Image (tube, rainbow, N blue to C red):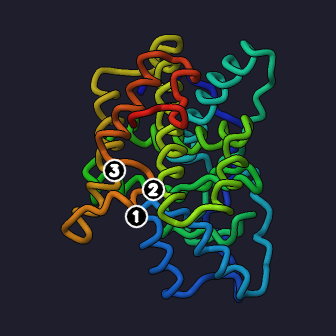
Amino acid sequence: MKLEDQRESSNVEDRRGMGMGVGGGIGLGTVALALVAWFFGIDPSIVLDTAQQMQPQQQSAPADPNAPRDEGRVFVGKVLASTEDAWDEIFQRTGNTYSRPTLVLFSGSTPTACGTGSTATGPFYCPGDQKLYIDLAFFRTLKERFKAPGDFAQAYVIAHEVGHHVQKLTGVASRVEAIRARSSPTEFNKVSVRMELQADCYAGVWGHYARDFKGLVEAGDVEEALGAATAIGDDRLQRQSQGHVTPDSFTHGSSEQRVRWFKRGLETGNPGSCDTFAARQL
């Protein structure tokens, strides 16, 4: 990606190295459960919130404004800024104002409105505080474990979580939560897939803006994002972990579906093309 001249977002909160303190962390058993939840695409907050309720609350120290701006922080700050510029413009076209989310960098674990966030859960968005949480160690996992290297692959992960923030702002997230309350786990899995694929499509919309309007995309970048979408499809993850695929337990969509919806957003640049909830075929 061509990020040299891109501004950095001011909405990055760096909590790395702060830790949770005594009584604020989570045990190995919880980490294992959260890892399993994340691996199968299940909302990690379900596991984390339970762990949080069983332990004393302890606030982390305020973010240090003088924390070193290392390469990782600069990168996520510039990618986040590019998503802000894209969605600012998109919302303005409809006469609305885009409320920018905060991206929290952490290491180990950190308190969130959705429970205790852990490295093991991977990146996630918490609608309760409208923040994205990322431990940069995940990008190494993406490269080494999932064989999806590249800066645009990493940017896709951020843009996907921003997509969930857009769903929060547009009311999709609240409607999905209402469906969760009255659905069986199997029924809700189907809704979850549509929600995640929409976030993939929104990531593609950002990619369209970054490529066609900002000139941030270099040769091979799109392939990196498609590689990441493929690597974290439910079918591929299940085949790797259990040797077979159980579609009824999908929560994020197959590799083919994730690639298809990202490409739709990338090609159209139109959020209106991302209505996965109305789509007959995903």
**Of callouts 2 and 3, the N-terminal one:** 3
Of labels 2 and 1, earlier in sequence is 1
Query: Which residue is the site of mark 1?
Result: 40
User: What residue is pinned by disc 3?
Assistant: 233
**In front: mark 2 or mark 1?**
2
Q: Is residue 173 left or right of residue 229?
A: right
Q: Position of residue 26 (x, y in %)?
A: 60, 83
Residue 177 % position (x, y): 68, 55
Residue 181, relative to residue 151: is it above or below? below
Residue 197 marker:
none
Q: Secondary structure at mark 2?
A: loop
Q: CA distance from mark 2 to mark 3?
A: 9 Å
The image's mark for residue 251 is: 2
Within 10 angstroms of label 1, few (less than 14), some, or many (20 or more) residues? many
Q: Nearer the viewer, mark 2 or mark 3?
A: 2
State the residue at coordinates (73%, 51%).
Answer: 66
Task: Tell me the CA gap for discs 3 and 1.
Answer: 9 Å
Does 56 appear above or below 15?
below
